[in-house]
Amino acid sequence: MMRESPRSYQELYDEGDRAQTSPHEQECVEDLESEDGNGRTSPAVDDEAGNNNLSMGFSKTCLKNVFSVILIFIYLLLMAVAVFLAYQTIADFMEKLKHPVMSVTYKEVDSFEAPGIALYPGKARLLSCKHHYHSHIPPLVTPGQPGDVNCFTDQINYTDPFTNHTTKHALVVRGPSYVRKRELIFLQFSQNETEQDFSAINYLLFYSFKEFAGSEDKAQFMKDCERSYSMWTFSGGFRTWVKMSLVKTSEKDGSESVEFRQESSVVKYNDRRKDSDKTNQLFFVVFEWRDPFVQEVRDIITANPWKTIAILCGIFLALFKAADFAKLSVKWMMKIRKRQLKRRSREMNQVS
């Protein structure tokens, strides 16, 4: 007969307790014990796994938060650059409006409208006036003696427009026109040099001799010309060769103004007259077009409003997109934060 090993009081109590429970309750207890035996070996092991999962989740969340902060910083930087570009674009546009650029173009012509040459000889006397071509002036035959006057001339007296006290006497001559033929006008004057300290004749160039000839008030026409154009001078005892060029300027109000620019060269006259005839000072002047180009000057505003508007639209679109991206990033961070808190609370509940 085999002897049974003595059992402890706890084992006997457990057997008694199991005997009092129902079969269904016994099955639930066994399932829990088996699940506990298969799933978690010990509370220490469960705590260690939970801590590892928490540390891994925390590191990923930290990286995501850092990345989101960097992304928002980049968006803010892009927004600052966009705002600066918008300000710079508007400032450049306003600066270009205030300071237009001068545009110079050259228009080639076959002939010019004959200008008017207003000469103020004073007591000097016109000896001769001739048209020549191809820049050729024949030798003087009888210098100091009256010759042919083959020019359209007109004499006009008018009051000085600046003083209104002095009466001026102007000899108006029709200027050269055919620039391709290199037409020129050669004029010769004589004046008694003993009556003056200096020998000089003033002259004025204006745009159209035709307008002067057709003007009803020629005196007022000459006053307006003297206000608008510059006065020039050529000296006695020399041949002054004046080469003219025309400049047309477009004003801001749409009107056009005309200005003459000239290059002059002076050559000394070798006087071979008798000593008795040299008391009269001789003046020689030549007028010719310098080249067949009319210089047109106009102010151009380089600020393009449509281009500026397009740039501003692109900048504002970039601003809105950057703000939209930043808003989505903030929502994403808040969503991740909520998920993290929910997961942490769930894990803490499971651990507890």
Image: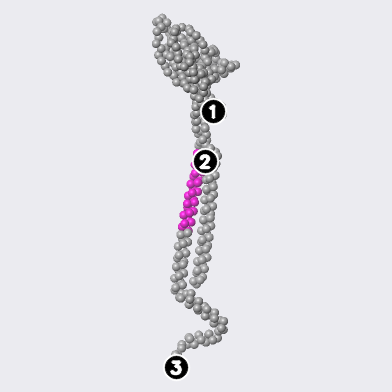
Residue range (magenta)? 65-92
Q: Residue at x 53, y 50 (%)?
A: 321
Q: Which mark is residue 251?
A: 1
Q: Residue at x 50, y 17 (%)?
A: 176
For the residue pair 349 and 19, the one nearer the viewer reads as 19
The picture places residue 266, in percent across and down from the top left corner, at: 42, 16
Q: Which residue is mark 3?
A: 2
Q: Is residue 26 above or below residue 326?
A: below
In terms of sequence position, does the residue under pointer 2 or pointer 3 come before the other?
Answer: 3
The picture places residue 344, in percent across and down from the top left corner, at: 50, 66
The kind of secondary structure element at disc 2 is: helix
Q: Which residue is mark 2?
A: 90
The kind of secondary structure element at disc 1 is: loop
Query: Can residue 96 be found in the magenta stretch?
Result: no
- State the CA–CA distance, disc 3 to disc 1: 135 Å
In terms of sequence position, does the residue under pointer 3 or pointer 1 come before the other?
Answer: 3
- Please say whether residue 335 is visible from this viewpoint: yes
- Please say whether residue 170 is visible from this viewpoint: no
The colour scheme of the drawn protein is one colour
Q: Is residue 312 above or below residue 333?
A: above
Asked whether the residues under the numbered discs 2 and 1 touch, taking CB atoms below 8 Å apart as contact, a structural biologist would say no
The picture places residue 301, in percent across and down from the top left corner, at: 52, 34
Give the residue at the far right of this rendering: 216
